[in-house]
Image: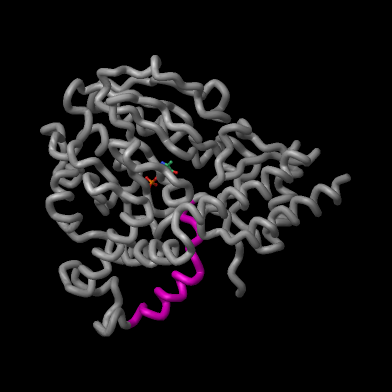
Amino acid sequence: MDRVYNFSAGPSMLPEAVLRKAQSELLNQAGTGMSVMEMSHRSPAFEDIHTRALASLRRLMQVPDNYRILFVQGGASQQFAAVALNLMHTNRKADYIISGNFAQAAYKEAARYGQARIAATSQEENFSRIPDLNAAQFDPQADYLHITTNNTIFGTQYNTLPQSGAVPLVGDMSSNILGKRYNVADFGLIYAGAQKNIAPAGLTIVIVREDLIGHAQSITPTMLDYAVHAKADSLYNTPPCWCIYIAGLVFEHLEALGGVDAMEQLNIAKAALLYDFLDDSRLFNATARREDRSIMNVCFTLPTQELTDAFLKQTKARGLVSLKGHRLVGGIRASIYNAMPPEGVQALVACMKDFEAAQA
Ligand SMILES: *Cc1c(COP(=O)(O)O)cnc(C)c1O
C-alpha cells in the first residue's frame, strides 16, 4: 500500500527519510548488533545518540548557554503540573492566557498548586482568536505568565508575544516547536510534547533558563523536579530511548533542510495555499481570525454535516486522511506540520476545488 498524506493533529507524520533511516538501522544500530530499543541507556552508543540530539536541537533553536534542555516523559500534560510545581515558588501566583483547551487544562492544573489567575481569555468566541493583550493585564507579582504558542484544536497562533516584563514567560510549544522561529531568550521556559512536530509520543522537551531550576515546591514529585533531571543530564531514570533516537534523526534532517527558518518559510507557503483558497471559496469557511491563523493547524467548515461527511469521503478516497476536525470545532482540520510535504497540501486544495466545483 502507498503511504497516505496524513493530516493528523498528533501523533503526526514523520519525514519519510527519517523513517527509512530508522528502518535501515533497526536491527543493528551503529554496529552494536542490536536496536536502539534494546540497548542500555548508559551505553556509549546511546550516549552518542543522546548527546547528538541535544546538540542538534540547541543549534536549531539557537538555545542560549544559560538554558538547559531536558528530555522527559509524561507528555505536555504532565508539564502543566511540573511548570507550576517548579516555578510557582516566590509568590505562588501565576497568570494564564486562555487561548484554547490545552491552555485551560494547564491553568486548571496550576490552580492545584498555587494561585493561578486568568489574565485573558477568548473562550466566549470559541477560541477563534488569540485574546487581545496589553501589559497592564498582567500581574507583575506573578511567578510566570503562561501561553500556548499554537492552539492545536482551534488553529490559532501568537504572532507577537505578550510583554510580561520581568515575569518569566512560559510557552507550551507542543504544536509549533521547530515550525516557527521563536527567540528562546524571550521565554523563561518552553515545553513541548514531541508527537506533533518531532518524534513518536513519549518524549517531552523542556527548555528552561538555569535560574528557574532548583526552587521546586517541597511537595514536588522527584520525577517532576527540573533540578533532578538537569543534574542527571536527563538520565535520572530510563529515558524514552527510541523517541530520543528518532528526535535526533528529525533534528539532523531539519538542519540539512536549512533549519527552523527554512521550515517556517515552507510552512507559511503551505498554509497560504489553503488560506488563499479558503478566502475565495463560497463553500468552505476558515474558522480562525485572520490575524491569528495558525500555519500548523488549518481549521475550516462546510455549511452542513452532510457536505462535511461527503468531503471527508472524497479526501479519503484520494489518500488524504485524518482530516476530521476536533469535536469542539467540528468541520475539518488540516494539520500541516514540518513533515507534511507541499505536495500533500496541493493535493488537498485540488480536492477542495473539485468538491466545490461539483457542488456548484
Ligand atoms: C497535544 C497538545 C498537548 C497535550 O500533549 P500530550 O503530550 O498529549 O500531553 C498540550 N498542549 C498542546 C498545545 C498540544 O497541542
Q: Quadrant of residue 209?
A: top left
Residue that sits furthest to the right in the current view: 360
Q: Position of residue 264 (x, y in %)?
A: 52, 50
Q: Quadrant of residue 3?
A: bottom right
Query: Would residue 187 be counted in the magenta stretch?
Result: no
Q: Position of residue 176 (x, y in %)?
A: 46, 46
- Could you tell me which residue is drawn at 50 percent across and 35 percent down? 159
Q: Position of residue 156 (x, y in %)?
A: 54, 36
Q: Position of residue 5 (x, y in %)?
A: 60, 62
Image mark count: 0
Tell me which segment is drawn in magenta.
10-27
Query: Would residue 11 be counted in the magenta stretch?
Result: yes
- Vertical placement of residue 239 versus 152, above or below: below
- Could you tell me which residue is drawn at 44 percent across and 58 percent down? 259
Rendering colour mode? one colour
- Could you tell me which residue is drawn at 39 percent across and 26 percent down? 163
- Could you tell me which residue is drawn at 51 percent across and 55 percent down? 263
Q: Nearer the viewer, residue 130 or 220?
A: 130
- Vertical placement of residue 291 versus 312, above or below: above
Q: Nearer the viewer, residue 216 or 38?
A: 216
- Vertical placement of residue 344 versus 231, above or below: below
Q: Nearer the viewer, residue 214 or 3?
A: 214
Q: Nearer the viewer, residue 269 or 21?
A: 269
Q: Quadrant of residue 2?
A: bottom right
Q: Quadrant of ligand 1?
A: top left
Give the quadrant of the C terminus: top right
